[in-house]
Image (cartoon, grey):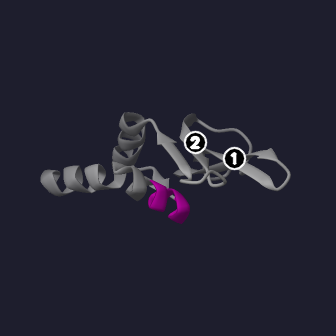
Amino acid sequence: MAVKIRLARGGAKKKPVYRVVVADERFPRDGRFIEALGQYNPRLENSLVDFKDDRALEWLQKGAQPTDTVRRLLRLSGVWAKFKGQSAAQA
């Protein structure tokens, strides 16, 4: 089972709001997921990015692969730097 950290779309037509979720890659985009990690609202002035940092870090350590967009959001929130810092310290 390959686990991905990806975006699930919500909101009205032409007014997207995304949830950052952990899901099996075989599940549909807006379908079943394992855990919700946060939200992303690109329509706000400063693009709201809100994560449960500790849970996102835990899933990354377990081997969950983020999509390109989620990886960019993780970099913005600082979670990616924590993950890379820990993986470098373990090696």
Residue plotted at (74% across, 42% down): 31
Q: Residue at x 78, y 51 (%)?
A: 15
The residue identified by callout 1 is 17
Q: Is residue 28 visible?
A: no
Q: Who is closer to the viewer here, 15 or 30?
A: 15
Discs 2, 1 touching: Cβ within 8 Å: yes
> Which element carries disc 1, helix, strand or loop?
strand
Bounds of the magenta segment: 67-73
Left or right of 81 in this view: 51: right
Real-space CA distance between mark 2 and mark 1, rounded to the nearest whole angstrom: 8 Å
Q: Determine whether 58 is above or below 83 in the image.
A: above
Q: Please tell me in which quadrant of the rendered image residue 14 appears.
A: bottom right
* Residue 89 in picture, x, y percent from top left: 13, 52
Q: Is residue 26 visible?
A: yes
Check disc 2 and report the residue beneath it: 39
- Hey, what amino acid is under mark 2? Gln
Residue 88 place in picture, x, y as percent: 18, 57
Magenta stretch contains residue 11: no
Between discs 2 and 1, the one toward the N terminus:
1
Q: Secondary structure at mark 2?
A: strand
Q: Residue at x 51, y 56 (%)?
A: 70
Q: Residue at x 38, y 48 (%)?
A: 60
- Residue 73 rendering spot, x and y as whole percentages: 48, 56
In screen coordinates, is 43 left or right of 37?
A: right
Which secondary structure class fits the magenta region best? Answer: helix
**Residue positioned most to the bottom:** 68
